[in-house]
Image (tube, helix red, strand yellow):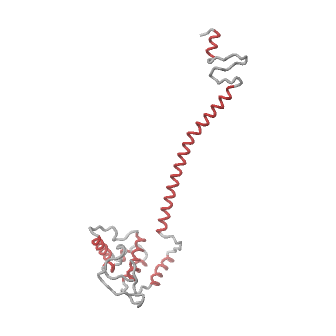
Amino acid sequence: LAKKYRDNRTRQHIPYREDKNLTGTARYASINAHLGIEQSRRDDMESLGYVLMYFNRGSLPWQGLKAATKKQKYEKISEKKMSTPVEILCKGFPAEFAMYLNYCRGLRFEEAPDYMYLRQLFRILFRTLNHQYDYTFDWTMLKQKAANAASSSTAATATAGLTTATVAGTTMVPQQISTTQMTSTNMMNTGNNGATPGKGGGKDDNGNELDENPKAASHTSNGQD
């Protein structure tokens, strides 16, 4: 996708040519690239302008065009790009963006862009808008947002697991406590004779065997119904 714009040995600029195939992403390609003209520094700068406007707008007017073939789609993109005035493309945004694109489109094939001028356009705008260099970009924010979402999902899964474990624990613990309490209670109620309440086999204080049904035994001994 990249090539030198001048010869390493002679330092001469590459020659002007036509009938070149489109190289690169059509969305950001310069108009000359669509026309089959050899690309040079001016085309790089124009492409950068489209990237900046993509950041500003979230999309470009020539996105989403449908066509039967890739060639036809490129033609539609080219037509839309050439028919969209810079002022319309940059409408609603600081004038510096339109100034930048108009400057780049006006460069000649071999002309060196005035990089200092272009930098100053945005540096002055940056200060005018009272921005601060925080080195945080849209793409890093998107990565951070995705990381936070993944972290939240993991935390939610862990919390759900903890809740399940707690519910299970709540179900089991009372059963264990209840069993322990019953055992302790039975032991306390056994008394000195070692009998378990409600069951036979124990002895009274005189050493006599206790009946399994004390109430029934009492009726019998008293001769009552």
Q: Quadrant of the N terminus?
A: bottom left
Q: Position of residue 69 (x, y in %)?
A: 27, 69
Q: Quadrant of residue 201?
A: top right
Q: Position of residue 115 (x, y in %)?
A: 45, 84
Q: Could you say which is closer to the camera, residue 30 or residue 186? A: 186
Q: Quadrant of residue 30?
A: bottom left
Q: Is residue 103 visible?
A: no
Count of marks, rendered view: 0
Q: Quadrant of residue 81?
A: bottom left
Q: Residue at x 36, y 82 (%)?
A: 39
Outermost top residue: 223
Q: Could you say which is closer to the camera, residue 84 or residue 212? A: 212
- 212 relative position to 39: left or right: right
Q: Quadrant of the C terminus?
A: top right
Q: Is residue 192 visible?
A: yes
- 24 relative position to 181: left or right: left
Q: Position of residue 57 (x, y in %)?
A: 40, 70
Q: Residue at x 34, y 87 (%)?
A: 15
Q: Position of residue 207 (x, y in %)?
A: 71, 17
Q: Residue at x 70, y 23 (%)?
A: 193
Q: Residue at x 48, y 65 (%)?
A: 143
Q: Could you say which is closer to the camera, residue 4 or residue 156? A: 4
- 87 relative position to 200: left or right: left
Residue 22, placed above or below residue 219: below
Residue 38, placed above or below residue 187: below
Outermost right residue: 206
